[in-house]
Amino acid sequence: MKQQLQPKLILIEGLPGFGKSTTAQLVYEILTEMGIEARLFLEGNLAHPADYDGVAFLEKVEYDALWNAHEQFRTLLSQYTSCQGNHYFVEFRRLLNEYGPGIPHEMMNAFVRNDVYELQLAQHRELITAKWRQCAEKALRGPDTYVFDCVFLQNPVTMGMIKNGAAEEYMTSYILELEAIIKPLNPLLIVVEQDDLEAAFRKAVCERPEEWSEGFIQYYTTQGYGLRQGHQGLEGTVQVLKGRRKLEERIYNLLSMHKTKVNNSAYDLQAYKRVLTEKLKEYF
């Protein structure tokens, strides 16, 4: 049975290698075929309306120091900077992508140090929840249904559990706060599952560039939860992912929003699209 209000936000979640991006792309494709105006934002989109990917957060004194030290870059810097009170947000990944080696190392190092995902957890959460509020307000005013890949569960859990080893209670309260913010959008959460977590992750490791797997394993085992548990290497990363899956499952069970799970173990694109189509028809 269709819901009274169509979702204006669809959230795609799941572990690495489970097929989140593929699912998000298929959901967008299905919505378009149904005549629904939709906007797709995949992981890593530097223009994401609810995330700060590749964005530095600077206090006024820090920004002024860069401004004064690099006079020849002032015009360029201002093009990628937005100001909120005494705080400055610099989209340094976009700046780097477009102007590359011309950016002074001192300036780039300052941006990397102050990346929103390198801040203290409490400050990071404050910025992210504020960003979600802005996004929700904008989405309510427009006609589009937004499709987001992995920013609702994965990003908070990665920052909280994986990076900082935050307590489960903290992670739960964080995600429930996000749920409350997006409630007016009547969101739908789709969680992608696999029968064999380890096989799915090993498949991703084999298929993706070596630098991705090396960086991922290091991130998951040298800080926060992985470090405290003594997990190392690929095997240790699998164990951290199992812990993450258990945490996300418990949080999933607490959520009151529309939610569903889809199994992508067969990697059969056409059959998978048919399953997703039937799921979406319940809400559109």
Image (cartoon, rainbow, N blue to C red):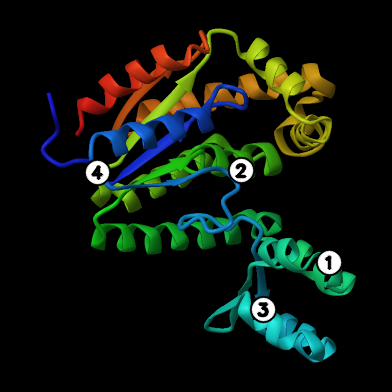
| Image quadrant containing the N terminus | top left
What's the CA distance linking mark 3 and mark 2?
23 Å
Give the residue number, with chain letter if any, for mark 3: 59
Residue 219 visible in the shown view: yes
Which residue: 51% across, 8% down?
A: 266
Q: For the view shown, which residue lies furthest in the right direction?
A: 105
> Which mark sits nearer the N-terminus, 1 or 4?
1
Alpha-carbon distance for marks 4 and 2?
A: 26 Å
Q: Is residue 269 left or right of residue 226?
A: left
Q: In the structure shown, which secondary structural element does the residue marked by tag 3 occupy?
A: strand
Looking at the picture, which amino acid does disc 3 mark? Answer: Glu
Q: Which mark is residue 186?
A: 4
Left or right, 212 with respect to 75, comes to right
Mark 2 vs mark 1: in front: 1
Q: Quadrant of residue 255?
A: top left
In the rendered image, which residue does mark 1 sit on? 109
Determine the secondary structure under disc 2: helix
Q: Which residue is mark 2?
A: 160
Residue 84 lies, in percent from the top left, at 52, 79
